[in-house]
Amino acid sequence: MNNKTVQQTPTYLEEFKRKGYSRKDFLKFCTLMAAYLGLENSAIGQVVQAMTVKPRLPVIWLHFQECTCCSESFIRSSHPIVADVLLDQISLDYSETLMAASGFQAEEAMKNTMTKYKGEYILCVEGSVPTAADGVYCMIGGKTSMQILEEAAEGAKAVIAWGSCASNGCVQAAKPNPTSATPIHKLLKGKPLIKVPGCPPIGEVMAGVIVHVVTFGRLPELDGLGRPKAFYSKRVHDTCYRRPYYDAGLYVESFDDDNAKKGYCLYKVGCKGPSTYNACGVTKWNNGVSFPIQSGHGCFGCSEENYWDNGRIYERASAFPGFGIEATADQVGKVALGVTAVALGAHAVMTNVRKKKLIKNLEKEGRDSEHELKD
Amino acid sequence: MATQKSTVHKLRRVYVWEQPVRIYHWLNALVIIVLIATGFYIADPLVIQSGKEPSQRFVMGWVRLIHFIASYIFFFNFLFRIYWGFVGNKYANWKQFIPTSRKFFKEMWHVFKMDILMLRGKEHMSVGHNAMAGFIYFFTFIAFLVQCLTGFGLYASMSSSWFPKLFTWVPYMFGGDIFLRQVHHWTMWFFILFAVIHVYLVFYHDYVEGRGEMSSMGGGWKFIEEDVFTQNKELPNAPKS
């Protein structure tokens, strides 16, 4: 498979046809992708055009410290072409999970792509890179992940950081981060980089990002954190179908109460939707079947930075740095308020003791003046 | 009747807090109370029972609206106060809050010894706020800034108005909304603690000094002992208003 793609690069349409998809399927796919990308109607033609004439994008897909859930999510994108075609036909020249080749053959394929398509291929990275102990915590083929990343990034046109591991460090980077797991953007400087956070990111979002790069030949519009705006500019809360219950002030108090059955807002049982930027409320998961909140469970903010250390899943804002995970700002605040009250009480007592003379004199002056006045 | 003649103080009326400062102070107090109350509700909403259908209810919506309106007032009031720190009288001047001289630190140390450690010695009789208070207010201004930045930063993504959009960079700088929300919540506790101590100390000064500390934020004047007045007047490097 790998050698073949290296020798001849067919266009996407040619590949679709070879796979047995009809033109109708192809157009459906292009329309779907344009819709996910938030493009206007007229841009569908651009997507179709690009997919028809552009040769398949060579891709190197690296796996470091991760669980492969990003790949799993990707191959479960709703439209069959996404899984079947983009994966197969995006020309995955090297992917530890999905390539047929192994060992030297695989390394060979990667090297081939890197030299033949220098400056053209897209480097997809799944997982974080451990930097502690010279990177021994993650080694493939005798090389540390840092070395592999640097080599592969050298000739890459752009880098896509798939998932929270590559974007934020995710669980490996959670305290105390024993391997010094580091997200990709902190290691690669000067390369165009797209972060697609999520644990995993939504399959359609991943496909959308690739289609955008193929269609327009450049990165999608990114926000200040490097995430594609098309998918990460709204909070889950803003697109949540339970939002009216939030505004109405109707909340689930515990998962087995009546409010939970009525489908009220999960805000008080720790839903992180109000601080999480993702497309879950719109695109949903598994062919648009559902998303966590629809299944009665709060969002736990998997696409947000540092989400493992940001407090408990079933409580809102429960972390207070320096006081352990158990303390909330309110608990600390109440204790501080109590201490303040005691201190002020002590100060008030001390004032009456230490400044007795002063207060007595003032009082005497006031009383004397009162006495001097006639009735 | 009087057994022993008491020291009779001649008091001099000094216009300390100008009207804009007083309006700023009380507007700020009101808005902060509203922000804290609504903020607590937003952070951990109480269940308010009613027979109304969900579609007829908008409790959180209203509370948030009030919070946002109050935050706008808070922000512009704060901005006005900074402006007044340059054009107001000497007791409103920014130099009252930011230490620029050795004298400032010396006064702070003196206030610390007299009013906090309660050591015996010459009482410190300030005219405006003392150096220690001024310096603490400097921290409150920083807390104001933190609340404005984190608050409008959180608000930016859900507003299409240009003003909150000016704060879009804030969540990006701190990696996201979760951390921002936490900081916004912690800083609120600073306001609560500050308010408690502030009110206590106003009582304290009124009680110990007997020169109208409490009412000064109403009428604007304090009553300064004649000797304190002349003493301060004679200082050659006293700032000109």
Image (cartoon, rainbow, N blue to C red):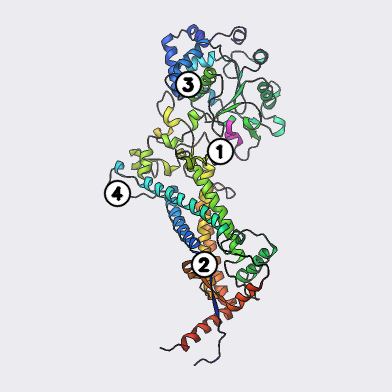
Label 3: state its secondary structure.
loop
Dots 2 and 3: beta carbons under 8 Å? Answer: no
- Of the numbered discs 1 and 2, the one sitting upstream in the chain is 1
**Can residue B42 be spotted in the picture?**
yes
Which percent across, then down, holds residue B9?
56, 81
Task: Say which mark, if any, is on residue B172.
Answer: 1
Q: Is disc 1 surrounded by few (<14), some (14 to 19) or many (20+) residues within 10 Å?
A: some
Displayed quadrant of residue A184:
top right
Disc 2 crowd, CA 10 A, few/some/many (<14, 14-19, 20+): some
| Spatial separation of the CA atoms under disc 1 and disc 3 | 31 Å
Which chain is disc 1 placed on? B
Q: Secondary structure at mark 4?
A: loop
From the image, tell me which residue sits under label 4.
B50
4 and 1 marks in contact (CB < 8 Å): no
Q: Which mark is residue B200?
A: 2
- The residue range painted magenta reads A167-178
What chain does mark 4 sit on? B
Q: What's the distance in space between the residues labelled 1 and 2, CA to CA? A: 39 Å
In this rendering, the label closer to the viewer, 1 or 3: 1
Residue A188 occupies quadrant: top right
Same chain check for tags 1 and 2: yes
Left or right relative to B66: residue B231: right
Picture quarter with the C terminus of chain B: bottom right
Q: Nearer the viewer, mark 4 or mark 1?
A: 1
What amino acid does circle 3 point to?
Arg
- The residue lying at 62 percent from left, 13 percent from top is A101
Q: Which of the two discs, 4 and 1, labels the residue nearer the N terminus?
A: 4
Chain assignment, label 3 = A
Q: Secondary structure at mark 2?
A: helix
